[in-house]
Amino acid sequence: MNAVISAAVHEYRNSNTDVASDRYVVTVNGTDYRTAVSSSGAVTAAAAPAEQSIPTQAAGNTPIPSPVAGTVIRYMVNEGDKVSPGDTVIIIESMKMELEIKATVSGTVHCLAAPGAHVAAQEILAEILTGASQ
């Protein structure tokens, strides 16, 4: 029996720098797996399937990044809800503290990271769709 396996590797990039990070998503037959690779090239973490593919920011949308590494506890709004600047969108836990992440613009929320997901600093958790992208 001949099995066909489709695989691809997608490199994360920190949105604040042009330097590639050591985090990758490996897609095997349509399932994404998050991995981390040490500077020596050894895989230091190969997680269970990721909840989602690597989020990409659409033009005109405002990303909501995690300010620190942590765990997404809950969304304070639902997918598609309208928010205004200052509205709390997401609660994350980091170092036993809960942090509120607030909207910086008005628009419609599009959730990217699932509750319970472990996230890195600057990883995009959600985005606010503004203007024509709503």
Image: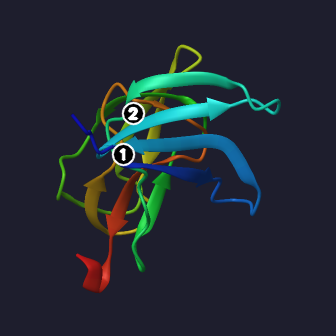
Residue at x 61%, y 36% (from the top left corner): 68
Q: Would you name the residue on which mark 2 appears?
A: 91
Between the residue at mark 1 and the residue at mark 2, the CA separation in whole angstroms equals 8 Å
Judged left or right of residue 66, residue 81 is left
SS at circle 1: strand
Contact check, label 1 and label 2, Cβ < 8 Å: yes
- Residue placed most toward the observer, 97 or 129: 129
The residue carrying mark 1 is 88
Q: Quadrant of residue 49?
A: top left
Q: Residues within 10 Å of mark 2 (few under 14, many from 20)?
A: many
In the rendered view, does 84 fall on the left or right side of 63?
left
The label number, if any, that marks residue 46 in the structure image: none
Q: Position of residue 115 (x, y in %)?
A: 31, 30
For the residue marked with disc 1, what is the amino acid?
Thr
Q: Can you see residue 104? A: no
Q: In the rendering, at what x and y percent does residue 125 appear?
A: 42, 47
Decide: is 12 above or below 69. Answer: below
